[in-house]
Image: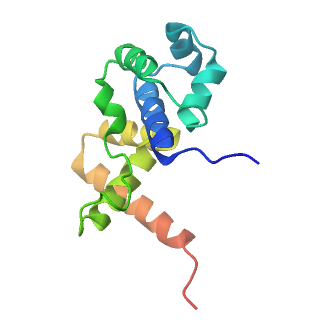
Amino acid sequence: MKKAPDPIDRHVGSRVRMQRILMKMSQEKLGDALGLTFQQVQKYEKGANRIGASRLQQISKTLNVPPSFFFEGAPTSGASAPSGGFAEESSSQYVVDFLSTTEGLHLNRAFARIRDPKVRKRVLDLVTTLAEQSEPAPE
């Protein structure tokens, strides 16, 4: 029976992936810089393998971010979460999850390059319309 990855390990891995993609670095190049195979990098990014402290320090130097970057927006346990902050935390987690995908990063990068505010608004309207059309109709 396979054990599901810990939510913190998945979060840290997704932040590694997000930063690696933002830097336009392949898994193979990151692996080479760390003395690892790209398969090991894949396992880290999926949260299947935990990243040790010294390895996380190595990754942070290679990706030019502080080690704390990998824990920003990390899920918290129910007992230590402040009351009343759940909705805000879940909506910010949605953004982190989206930006952790290849599509999210590419869309964000391309959208940021559009300088004309009218064109940006039209793109937003298009995406909103497409999203509404893909939702199932209420019964």
Is 72 on the left or on the right of 41, as rendered? left
| Residue at the front extreme, as displayed | 79
Q: Position of residue 53 (x, y in %)?
A: 41, 22
Of 28 and 48, which appears nearest the observer?
48
Tally of numbered tags: 0
Residue 23, located in which quarter of the rendered image?
Answer: top left
Q: Residue at x 34, y 38 (%)?
A: 71
- Tell me if residue 127 comes above or below residue 54 in the rendering: below
- Residue 67, quarter of the rendered image: top left
User: Residue drawn at (25%, 53%), measured in percent from left and top?
Assistant: 118
Residue 75 appears at what percent x and percent y? 39, 51
Q: Is residue 130 above or below residue 93?
A: below
Q: Position of residue 83 (x, y in %)?
A: 24, 67
**Residue at far bottom of view:** 139
| On screen, residue 49 above or below 24 | below
Q: Position of residue 38 (x, y in %)?
A: 62, 19
In front of the other: 122 or 128: 128
Single out the residue that lies furthest toward the right: 1
Display coloring: rainbow
Quadrant (top left, top right, bottom left, bottom right) of the C terminus: bottom right
Instruction: Decide which of 117, 84 is in the foreground and name it.
Output: 84
Q: Is residue 125 above or below residue 15?
A: below
The residue shown at (38%, 56%) is 77
Which residue shows up at 35% across the image and 42% down it? 111
